[in-house]
Image (spheres, rainbow, N blue to C red):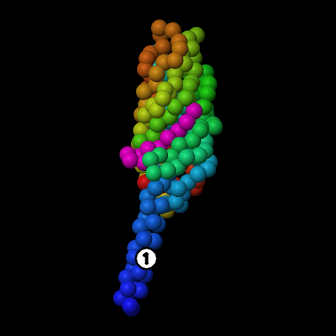
Amino acid sequence: MKHVKMLGLLVMAAASLVASAASASAATFTSPTGTAYFGQFDLTLEGSTLMKAGFAETTCTESTIGGEFTTNNDTHATGPTKVVSFTKCSLTTTTLNSNGTLTINKSNTAVSATGVEWTIAALGTSCVYGFGAGTSLGTATNTTVGGVDKVTLAIKASLGKISGGFACANPATFTGNFIVTTPTSSFVD
């Protein structure tokens, strides 16, 4: 009887470990590490962005992308972007037309966006570019900054032309490096 009780305790302990491992691995974007994160996220530009659209090239030295993860499960973390700003840009007009959605895929930490559009004006011509359904932005990676886990995103994306004249290239390219600043500690797994 003593062995049956011990076996029962071992089975319960093993089940508990499996359950906690399953819940820890179900998250895509975590804060703290291993705990699914829901709530506000902010990404801040490190360095500068570059958008090349044929004759028009614009570099911005300040940018913030903010939103809220409303879904975070065993396949992806996703949520609406509420703020996408680009300032201190080389062209006089870089306007954000709409916000969209940001998604981090769990299987390969690929980051994609949908529904963000920009208008870029240069030399009297306006070109509108944007992220179509699930436009690939790059891959989220984990790093440590000052002893704190951080997620970084190196964006290298192709943006489709939504409208504009023949002088507006199609597609345009967009590059930039961002780091998650909210939550303070973050991880992708």
The residue positioned 59% from the left and 38% from the top of the image is 80
Kindly state the secondary structure of the residue where label 1 is placed: helix
Q: In which quarter of the image is the N terminus?
A: bottom left
- Tell me if residue 92 comes above or below residue 103 in the rendering: above
The residue positioned 61% from the left and 21% from the top of the image is 93
The one of 16 and 129 positioned closer to us in this rendering: 16
The one of 22 and 167 positioned closer to us in this rendering: 22
**Residue 3 x/y as whole percent:** 36, 88
- Tell me if residue 21 comes above or below residue 182 in the rendering: below
Q: Does the magenta stretch include residue 69?
A: no
Q: Name the residue under label 1.
A: 13
Q: Which corner quadrant of the image does residue 124 belong to?
A: top right
- Tell me if residue 145 comes above or below residue 94 in the rendering: below
Mark 1 crowdedness (10 Å alpha carbons): few <14, some 14-19, many ≥20:
few
Decide if residue 73 is in sight here.
yes
- Left or right of residue 157: residue 35: right
The one of 148 and 7 positioned closer to us in this rendering: 7
**Residue 17 x/y as whole percent:** 43, 70
Q: What stretch is highlighted in magenta?
A: 100-109
